[in-house]
Image (tube, coloured by chain):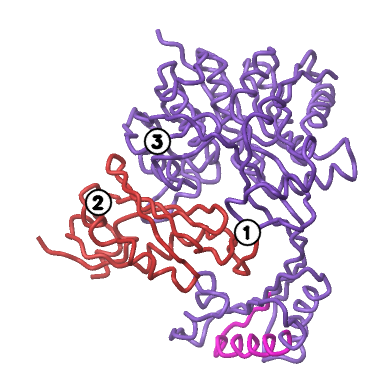
Amino acid sequence: MTKKVYIGSGAGFAGDRFDAGAPVVETLGRMDGPRYLIFEVMGERTLAIAQRIKMRNPDKGYSPYLDHYLTGVLALCREHNVRIVANLGNANPIGGAKRVHELAKELGIEGLRVAIVEGDDLLTFMSADEVGSLPTVEGLSIDGKEIVAANVYLGARPVAAALALGVDIVLVGRTTDAALVLGPLIHEFGWAEDDWDRLAAGTVAGHLLECGGQVTGGYFCDPGFKDVPGMADLGFPVAEIDEMGGIVIGKAANTGGMVTRATVTEQILYEVHDPANYLTPDVTLDITGVTLEDAGKDRVRVKGARGKPPPETLKATVSADGGFLGEAELTYAGPNALARAKLAADIVTTRVKRRITDTGIRVEVIGAGAVFDNDRSERLAGDNRPLDGEYRLRAAVRTQDKAEAQYLTDEVLSLFCSGPAGGGGFRCSVLGQVNTSSVLLPRGPVEARSRAIEVTP
Amino acid sequence: MSSITVPLHAVAHGRAGDKGNRSNISVVPYLPDAFPHLKAQVTEARVLELFRHKGASAVTRYELPNLPAMNFVIDDALEGGVNSALCQDLHGKTLSFLLLGEMTVTVPVACVPAGSRYLQDK
């Protein structure tokens, strides 16, 4: 029989459910073959925030939710011989590994082995000026700004190297999300560096798993059009992959959600641009020939991924201070609510523009098509919406000056006594922001530095 | 066969994703027979028109006939995206429903799934 590897997802983004992993591990435990549980919990912004935390406390900077995600699955994974691959390392994989050892001790688990992948942090071997001079391919230019974090996307090879150390858990910082899946597959099957079609298949499997419940009915259901059962207990995906690159996407047993060709189709195109050229450090993926077949209830077979050599350069995300985002909201309801909300918007716009002249503001009416509109509410202006109803004024500004952001929220608050009748439900926030840009750099120096090391208690 | 003019939402579903100031929106027909009609009618030019007020500058359509599905990549659609947008939805996650709701298509009635409320409304 062909060897199969089973890989499940326990989380698909930094704010995902903490309890989705346990049913996945229970399901993996019934499979006959190597089993892995991945957690993808790292965003570009979470990394920059973690980097700031690490600057203040060198022991921190790993995922603040490491305990939340691992506490419920660590013993189960031990029991079922499931290895964990997770980017819970964030800006500090070694710190994260040390915390995993402490957590294991607290849970009474002995002899747990943990490895990390390092080498993604460009600031450990490049100056901020050198990073700042790399060519920007996406996002804002970071030229002249204070750089908070600069991390290159590593591929799957160092993840496979970490698994080869024989550890139970691998914590990484910045790798591609798909590497969390392709790494174990390379480790298990020994796929060569130029076995493009199989590397492509592993990358597709990774792409389908990396967002957790987004392939099992999450972010999919649309009542009456795309109904999904059991959304409150959405089951996370479990994939089986064979050594020829055959993939079946399934999900945790005894959970809600569903796996259909439709759920897989939405996820396979998620955040893909040119489907013939999806660039990763390991392979350039072509999904134009992919076909999907039903393979039983909640099982879809994915075939036909093709691969080509990857680009010569690697992508890195550079984060810089992004000033502040100030936002405030106030609701108007009942008869003539839209007219009162629009008047409130006019008042706030007039007053805020007297003080904030060097940057744009957005003042709009939620309930009147705001999210589809632009900063000038041009669609609302040409619209004939009912005056009666429930509408919510919203004002927003981005500025380097925190006091200006606060001023905008104060102006919305002042509508309580000085604005139109019947406003209520004021909320506001002023939050520090991170700007990011994507830059390209040559592979050589990065690959020479990336390595897997075991971290002992 | 009789035809019906409906929002795209009646015949297709989709998901939006972001990278920088660029949005991608998949369009997936509920029934494969609808695919040729969508290819003919959901054009790059019509999609660009729907997002121009957001600042969209160009649309590229990729076709995946095996799935079947189309993928629209819309440049500069996110008012700056997570770095600089003032919109509530910095990532443009809601924009799949702007496309599905405001694009209309004329298709054979059989391309709309049976029991759809778009059939009952008529």
- Which region is colored magenta? A329-352
Tell me the residue that label 1 is attached to.
B82
Tell me the residue that label 2 is attached to.
B35
The chain carrying label 1 is B
Q: Secondary structure at mark 3?
A: strand
Considering depth in this image, is A177 or A128 the residue closer to the camera? Answer: A128
User: Where's residue A80, x and y in %?
Assistant: 62, 16
Q: Secondary structure at mark 1?
A: helix
The chain carrying label 3 is A
A440 vs B3, left or right, is right
Q: Nearer the viewer, mark 1 or mark 3?
A: 3
User: Where's residue A199, x and y in %?
Assistant: 47, 25
Other-residue count near label 2 (Cα within 10 Å), few / some / many at <14 / 14–19 / ≥20: many
Instruction: Say whether residue A444 is magenta.
Output: no
Q: Quadrant of residue B83?
A: bottom right
- Judging by colour alone, the chain drawn in purple in this rendered image is A
User: Where's residue B102, x and y in %?
Assistant: 37, 69
Q: Quadrant of residue A101?
A: top right
